[in-house]
Image (cartoon, rainbow, N blue to C red):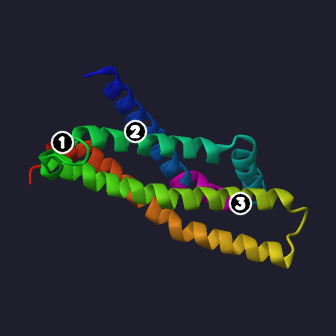
Amino acid sequence: MNTYLLVLRLVHIVAGIIWGGGALIMSFFIGRAIPATGESGQKFAQHLMNNLRMHRFMTAMAVSTVVAGILLYWHDSNGFTSAWMTSGAGIGFGIGAVFGLIAFVFGAIFGNSNAKLARLGAQIQGKPTDEQLAQIQAIQKRIKTVSPIHVYSMILAMLFMATARYFIF
């Protein structure tokens, strides 16, 4: 294996672990704890998004994963042209890639919505106005809609990527 492929594979796997793990932790634990802990949870979320810039970090991991994955698939399929694409592994990695791209798109919506919510929360002094409350509710509705799509497509992408080389069609 040459250095280029080794680096691509490491970037794809490590960034994917960080991206996927972060998404699952956010969805299953942190995202549920924030509203349950009231004002202190909101301050935590604002600090996480505004001060620690988690949104930017997760975006960088997602982009790194997707770009490295595309380059790896390009290499293995000889520029998206070889018979390898119709092999068990090629199909498995392809299905995983589709779920990964779905996770990427819905993760971007999820991340942007969380960042907007944190920025809006930082602007509120005391009780939110009716307009701010309407914005908060609209953003929360969007998050509630896209989060399951993001998380479950992420899980499916990870499962297909982890097992694709063993597929026989």
Q: Are marks 3 and 1 in contact (CB under 8 Å)?
A: no
* Horizontal side of residue 84 vs 10, given as left or right: left
Q: Secondary structure at mark 1?
A: helix
Whether residue 61 appears in this view of the structure is: yes
- Residue under label 2, please give it: 68
Whether residue 36 appears in this view of the structure is: no
Structural crowding at the residue carrying mark 3, measured as other residues with C-alpha within 10 Å and reported as few (<14), some (14–19) or many (≥20):
some
List x then y, in percent, for residue 66.
Answer: 42, 45
Q: Which residues are magenta?
A: 27-36
The first of marks 1 and 2 along the sequence is 2
Q: Are marks 2 and 3 in contact (CB under 8 Å)?
A: no
Image point 59% across, 66% down: which residue?
Answer: 143
Q: Amino acid at mark 1?
A: Arg
- Residue under label 1, please give it: 165
The first of marks 2 and 3 along the sequence is 2
**Numbered mark located on residue 116 in the image:** 3
Q: Are marks 1 and 2 in contact (CB under 8 Å)?
A: no
Q: Gap in Å between the C-alphas at discs 2 and 3?
A: 28 Å
| Depth order, front residue of 68/131 | 68
